Image: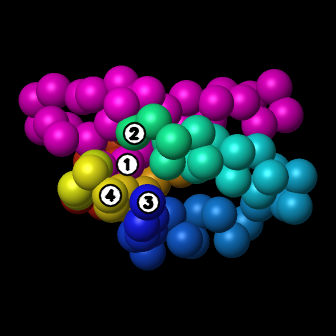
Amino acid sequence: MKITQSPSFARSIKKLHSNQKKSLDRAVKTIAKNPAIGEEKVGDLAGIAIYKFKINNLEWLIAYRVITKKEIKLLVAGPHENFYRDLKRGL
């Protein structure tokens, strides 16, 4: 499985501590094993899936797009607060 990341995803993970990055890595591995695990969005976010997970008892989300059966592009990661606003702005 080829996993690519957008520049905004790379910027958001730079700010994380090592234990937070481990939680994020587990979430990305889960997505890579089963890309259909995320919730598909509709409307102006059609084609984007959202996967929810916890970092230090705080709900985080990863937005990703399945390009092909063997390629996933990670778009944005962050806490739920203002997540969808930032996602729409980045598209």
The amino acid beneath tag 3 is: Met
- Disc 3 vs disc 1: Cβ atoms closer than 8 Å? no
The amino acid beneath tag 4 is: Lys
Range of magenta residues: 36-65
Residue count near mark 2 (Cα–Cα under 10 Å), binned few <14, some 14–19, many ≥20: many
Q: CA distance from mark 2 to mark 1?
A: 9 Å
Residue 12 visible to the viewer: yes
Q: Which residue is mark 4?
A: 70
Residue nearer the viewer, 2 or 11 = 2
**Label 1 secondary element:** strand
- Disc 2 vs disc 3: Cβ atoms closer than 8 Å? no
- Disc 2 vs disc 1: Cβ atoms closer than 8 Å? yes
Residue count near mark 3 (Cα–Cα under 10 Å), binned few <14, some 14–19, many ≥20: few
From the viewer's perspective, is 43 left or right of 73?
left
Which quadrant would residue 38 be assigned to in this image? top left
Residue in the picture at 37% in, 48% down: 64
Which quadrant would residue 59 be assigned to in this image? top right
Residue in the picture at 18% in, 41% down: 47
**Label 2 secondary element:** helix
Q: CA distance from mark 3 to mark 4?
A: 5 Å
Residue count near mark 1 (Cα–Cα under 10 Å), binned few <14, some 14–19, many ≥20: many
Q: Which residue is mark 1?
A: 64
Q: Position of residue 15 (x, y in %)?
A: 73, 66
Residue in the picture at 22% in, 56% down: 68
Q: CA distance from mark 1 to mark 4?
A: 13 Å
